[in-house]
Amino acid sequence: MDKKGKLGQLKEDFLLFLKGAFDFKDKSNRFLKKEAYDAQDNFILLCFGDLLGLPLPTSYYTIELLPYLMEDLESWERRMIRRNEIWQEKWAEFDFFG
């Protein structure tokens, strides 16, 4: 490879590094926030699914967590009501046939 090719490759690699290091479009932040909300939603669903009509035998024990999660319950209920199909969202993340 000549000097121009090496210099061009170095420039391209440096620009890719900057693009990855400084994500100006906040794609990674949005992705991490979505993953955090999904993890929190799953935890609250396991603890307080009876609020949505899911019979859970552990609700007697998870009532002790209620004071710690009280602030998040209202927004969680709104997010769960807005979802059309929870299982469809989760299964869409896995590509079984590709």
Image (tube, rainbow, N blue to C red):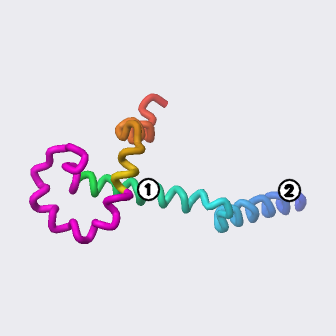
SS state under label 2: helix
29 in relation to 80, above or below: below
The N terminus: image quadrant: bottom right
Q: Main secondary structure of the magenta part?
A: helix
On whether residue 50 falls in the magenta region, the answer is: yes
Displayed quadrant of residue 85: top left
Query: Magenta segment: does it hold 83?
Result: no
Looking at the image, residue 22 sits to the left or right of residue 77; the answer is: right
Residue 15 vs residue 88, the one in the foreground: 88
Question: Which residue of the protein is positioned furthest toward the bottom in this rendering?
Answer: 68
- Answer with left or right where residue 95 lies relative to residue 4: left
Distance CA(mark 2)–CA(mark 1): 40 Å
Residues marked 2 and 1 touching at CB (< 8 Å): no
Q: Position of residue 24 (x, y in %)?
A: 68, 63
Tell me which residue sits at (44%, 37%) in the image.
92
Count residues near mark 2 (Cα–Cα under 10 Å), then give few for <14, some for 14-19, many for 20+. Answer: few
Left or right of 30: which side holds 85?
left
Label 1: which residue? 35
Disc nearest the viewer among 2 and 1: 1
Q: Say whether disc 2 or disc 1 marks the residue closer to the N-terminus.
A: 2
Residues packed near mark 1 inside 10 Å, few (<14), some (14 to 19) or many (20 plus): few
User: Which residue shows up at 78% across the image and 63% down it?
Assistant: 10
| Residue under the image location 44 percent in, 41 percent down | 93
Q: Position of residue 79 (x, y in %)?
A: 40, 50
Name the residue furthest top.
97
Amino acid type at circle 1 is Glu
The magenta region covers 47-75
Residue 5's label in the rendered image is 2
Front residue of this view, candidates 76 and 8 = 76
